[in-house]
Amino acid sequence: MKKIFPLILVPLLSLFSVSAQITQAEADSIVKERMNGETKPYTIYAKESAQAGFEITTIANEALELDYSCWIYYINFTEEVNGKYLMVKESNGNILEINTRNDENPDDLAAWRVVMGIIPFVEYPLFDSFCVWTNLSYYGPHPGYLHPHLQVINSNEELEQYVSCAEGSYPKIDFSKHTLLLVSGIVRKGLPIVSICKNLLQLSANNFRLDVELQLFGRPNINSFTLECWGFAILTSKMDEESNIAINLTNTTTSCELMNIPASLYGNLTIINSQSEMNHYIECTDAPAPEIDFTKHTLLIVGGFFYNNVWKTQNQLIKKGVNHYELDVAVWITSETEGDKWIVKLLIPKLAPDDIVSLNVHHPNWK
């Protein structure tokens, strides 16, 4: 049974002239606005041209035929069977939404244009192993706070260049199905990092954007540090070699305060093994403190300073004996003599009561 669908179901919030024809770019914006706030991973697909007399089967298994010209979009939810159609009326921009049930994707979906998508990913942390990131580049094409570095890794041979393990090995990856995105950057003349939020978007068939938000300690005091190097890795579905990934970096401040962290010329190591210990060093008023499972992990914090400006830091965990580890921190400096404080934070597997961690801070380019 076929029904001719009436003109308008959902009013358009954007302001358009009633007589104006809606362009493809305008229709894209309308659909993106409609999907704004959706947290489930999805991809928006679009027909390349406006369609007249488009037919579709509804969730009630009724066949509908639209008797007006519209821009057709299909929303594919990555982790769900059900998708939905969004139709934007070409004459005035009104939008119609039709949900599908147990619907396979449109037969010709491969030919549809990719408008945008929220791409699913999983964190690839090393803190469940005695491994750390190494040989990281902290600056992108244009050195500075807003230009972190992105390394796209598609093989174990590439990954081995950026991981150093004191013992054991890093978590294995099936690179026939996955791509690892390794991102690293630096915060200079600012506050230390509380946490990092990430979101991966697909903007077109081969163009992606990785949104990165640094959440910084918001209350400076005499223990504030002016430089911190950071890095993280996320694992996503295999990407083509033609894929272009841009990074959009922002920052916010929190109500948290980092305090009582000692600093010296060759660094001071603070070992935190419980929430009560962490409360001595981190205090938050309007937000919860960072969550760490101290039954499984130990937090290492190193604070230091130098008479010259600090350029970057690089750390490595080394097994020195049965119960002895060494945290090696290399601090590169510049010729500027303003002086800098720096901080290194490292989460590792839970240390045993008789485990020892010694600290070795050195300056490779200081003579």
Image (cartoon, rainbow, N blue to C red):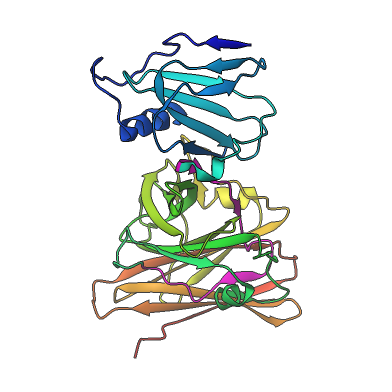
> Which residue is depicted at the point 63% across and 50% down?
292
Quarter of the rendering containing residue 169: bottom right
Residue 364, position as x, y percentages in the image: 41, 86
> Which residue is depicted at the point 37% across and 51% down?
248
Residue 307, position as x, y percentages in the image: 30, 76
Quarter of the rendering containing residue 98: top right
Q: Is residue 339 left or right of residue 158?
A: left
Q: Which residues are magenta?
A: 114-139
Question: Eyeballing the image, is 170 above or below 85?
Answer: below
Nearest to the observer: residue 13 or residue 206: 206
Residue 265, position as x, y percentages in the image: 40, 76
> Which residue is depicted at the point 34% across and 91% down?
367
> Which residue is depicted at the point 38% across and 60% down?
225
Q: Is residue 160 left or right of residue 139?
A: right
Judge whether residue 203 is colored magenta.
Answer: no
Question: Eyeballing the image, is 350 above or below 337?
Answer: above
Nearest to the observer: residue 162 or residue 84: 84
Magenta stretch secondary structure, dominant: loop
Judge whether residue 131 is colored magenta.
Answer: yes
Quarter of the rendering containing residue 87: top left
Nearest to the observer: residue 12 or residue 198: 12
Residue 177, position as x, y percentages in the image: 65, 60
